[in-house]
Image (spheres, rainbow, N blue to C red):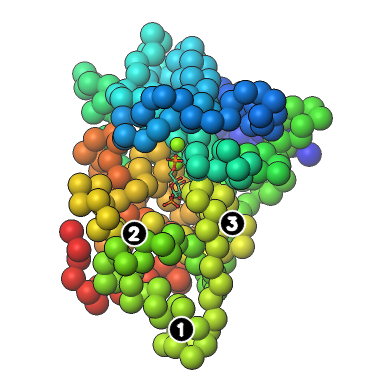
Amino acid sequence: MKRLLPTLRADQTSESLISVINTIQIAAKEISFRLHQGALAGVLGSTLDENIQGETQKKLDVVANQLLKSLLLESPNVHAVASEEEDSVVDSPNSGHYLVAFDPLDGSSNIDINGGVGTIFSILRKPEGEETSESMFLQPGKAQVAAGYVLYGPATMMVLTTGKSVRIYTLDQTVGEFLLTQEKAEIPKDTTEFAINMSNRRHWADPIKAYINDLLEGKEGPRGKNFNMRWNAAMVSDVHRVLSRGGLFTYPWDARKPKKPFKLRLMYEAAPMAMLVEKAGGKASDGYQRILDIVPEHIHQRVAVVLGSANEVDACLKYHKQYPKPY
Ligand SMILES: O=P(O)(O)OC[C@H]1O[C@](O)(COP(=O)(O)O)[C@@H](O)[C@@H]1O
Ligand SMILES: [Mg+2]
Ligand SMILES: [Mg+2]
């Protein structure tokens, strides 16, 4: 089986980009090891701190962030990093060609229940010129040179695209290497599975209420087929299911917290996942525009997300056209 780096060399990925991906895989292996040690590694539970987004940080959020940040900042190919767990962009002493944005630990609420969690990353080219580090990151998702995630599930997997196909690697714990286990992930166009946090139903806007209602009507309703539902509470796990067998995943606008109507982060979650989903033949939208076209206004920006099987995303978007936009 092929190892990660040779598969990248085989399609002429630049050595500098390979080196950044290599740094991420080294951090991911360390995070994977600590996670799989569970309570033995003393990394379960919460810290007393909150991140910039006002969320309580789990110990593993902090450990994963430290590992990725310190290793990436040592890389001669990285110019700066942006993390969900950092207040602002962190500059590297090196002036490399790449910027890396990441969600070090996605699905934090699953840590203490031994559920699926992941790391999501997005690699951008550093623009030319004298911009501030923060403004350098404010590029639309379509400018990403690579995107991926690591799923720390029963097996640890890395799912990666450098703009060509989406490859899936599995960590062979016996040799400590990510080995290529799927050359090309492809999302089926149609599906009968959806993922949404149903407990927020009363807070949704009309397009999502109407769409989900019609799915729940099943065979007897306007869609004429029965739909199944899954929700892992970790975007990495939910998107991995979509990449593996199709489905629609959404975290829509909702009216719970008027000042925070979206949950998922554009730069650390939505944009990298959108690149993977599109490269695997699916679609990713905020309900009104392609996620990859959105130009971030600030690094911690949040966004509504509808992604997955192309025909099902289109079906959902039709409801967004029929009802007024809630924001
Ligand atoms: O708690 P909820 O409403 O089910 O939200 C789950 C969503 O929140 C997230 O966990 C946010 O990620 P973090 O754990 O990185 O904050 C997504 O991965 C997931 O889709
Ligand atoms: Mg997350
Ligand atoms: Mg996180």
User: In this rendering, which labeled residue sits more in front, label 2 or label 3?
Assistant: 2
Q: Quadrant of the N terminus?
A: top right
Residue type marked 2: Pro
Residue at 46% across, 47% down: 273
Label 1 neighbourhood size at 10 Å, few (<14), some (14-19), many (20+)? some
Residue at 42% across, 87% down: 222
Question: Which mark identifies residue 252?
Answer: 2
96 in relation to 172, above or below: above
Question: Which mark identifies residue 201?
Answer: none
Secondary structure category for the residue under label 2: loop
Q: Quadrant of the C terminus?
A: bottom left
Task: Report how far apart the C-alphas of labels 2 and 3 lie in the structure.
Answer: 19 Å
Q: How many marks?
A: 3
Foreground pick, 220 / 202: 202
301 in relation to 129, above or below: below
Question: Which mark identifies residue 241?
Answer: 3
Left or right, 70 with reference to 306: right
